[in-house]
Image: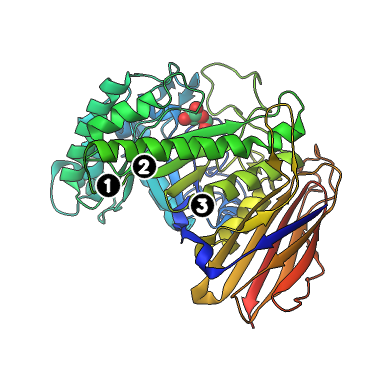
Amino acid sequence: MKAKMTLAKEFKIGDIDKRIYGSFIEHLGRAVYGGIYEPGHPEADEDGFRKDVIRLVKELNVPVVRYPGGNFVSGYNWQDGVGPVCNRPKRLDLAWGTTEPNSFGTNEFMKWCKKANTECMMAVNLGTAGPEQARNLVEYTNHRGASAWSDLRKSHGYSEPWDIKLWCLGNEMDGRWQMGAKTAAEYGRIALEASKLMKWTDGSIETVLCGSSSRNSPTFGEWEATSLDIAYDSVDYVSLHQYYENRADDTPSFLAKTLELEEFIYTVICVCDYIKAKKRSKKTINLSFDEWNVWYHSDNAPYERWSMSPPRLEDIYNFEDALVVGSMLITLLRHCDRIKIACLAQLVNVIAPIFTQTGGGVFKQTIFYPFEHLSNYGRGAALNPIISCPKYDCKEFDDVPYLESISTFDEENGLMAVFCVNKSLDENMVLDINIMDFEGYKPFEFISMDGYDKLAENGFDKCPVIPHKKETPKMDGNSMTVELKPLSWNVIRLKKI
Ligand code: AHR
């Protein structure tokens, strides 16, 4: 099949906020214990952080990591996780049916962030706790001068404030599985009061209001409108969460889920702007897509109730999952004028691109690569490519373009990139790319993941699903032609020569 793409500087969607390449670590399964933190492991540093994991986190170039949950945060008392470890209580975590030892907490995570070159997006408990516990945590982490909570931090050995800038006002508060779940009006009130007190404690922070736990949530739409209407003046972002799955072994529909994702993002933008209009406000609420991924392989895996850090949600990803993850991130970038933050959920072991063996090695899951490519090469501004390509119909969607694509332009460093997924199961795509007014730009690298069985996976013994370099395409005037194999992930990088 043939396809065409046109790119021009004027097709700018917006500047990409680097936080769109964020991720997530929850006190869940082996994300913390046996993931980022494993004292006694041969790769552990003096703080017990696994250096092999930090190396891979740095390869992913993740600028922000959400912490400590997730469902976990809705029952968490942050005071359990600070101070001398020997005094910290073991608690039952009702979210995941396990026992939390609390040997890793806020200060350990902040130290880890420094070592992993990332920043923290801190979530507060608005389930079983409320505004007071939340504002106390802001004072504990961010207040420089003398006060009860900042003095407590100093007495724990941290004289300098951590200066955490981004705060989530709870997690999925609409979900019946959430500890302290609320109605939209109840949540709007508590979120407003928490955000207000947190910002009175530190006026430099930004806060994220919980949107619905997914587009399928029964209250979706109404939840955002009601809670935003109440909390609008104090919050900065509204959150979105979405996971996709391929239970019916229907790859064409699975790959087409980005059409639904588009719709989801568009609807939330509309709700934010509706409330803005209603309030005649000058303030725009942007989006924080702070949980997204493929998640379904590990459902129903048995675990021992109340055990400590048992393996949970350990999806092993296949090649088609990598194409969906790449397509999802492309879709988020297409809305980078409004999506300022996004978190691949999660980062290590729990539905994650990095997978460790407790006491053993580590490997890169298939989904590691599209994220790594976009995060490292997709900086600057996002450009909306004008695409003409054939479309397909499948069980769940009609008119699905075979080509999913975004282009990025980093003017400062004279770099461009084009990211493409060919969703056809069996046809090559011959793609003509015209780069219009990008004079002097030439391709210098063409990276692909193709030719793999859609169910191929990586593991500790072998990692067959990896990117490979292809022959760099040649320019003919302002155009080049590239061949995209069936079911493929492709990155064409250009620079000003
Ligand atoms: O990421 C796993 C879980 O998914 C999170 O704890 C929760 O917020 C969501 O339902």
Residue 494 at x, y percent in the picture: 65, 72
Q: Disc 3 vs disc 2: Cβ atoms closer than 8 Å?
A: no
At label 3, which amino acid type do we have? Answer: Tyr
At label 1, which amino acid type do we have? Answer: Thr
Is 396 placed above or below 51 here?
above
Is 26 placed above or below 46 here?
above
Residue 196 at x, y percent in the picture: 19, 38
Cα–Cα gap, marks 1 and 3: 24 Å
At label 2, which amino acid type do we have? Answer: Met
Residue visible at 17% across and 38% down in the picture: 197
Q: Which residue is mark 3?
A: 21
Q: Which residue is mark 2?
A: 122
Q: Which residue is mark 1?
A: 141
Is 228 in front, or is 451?
Answer: 228
Badge 3 or badge 2: first in the primary sequence: 3
Residue visible at 30% across and 52% down in the picture: 162
For mark 3, give the secondary structure: helix
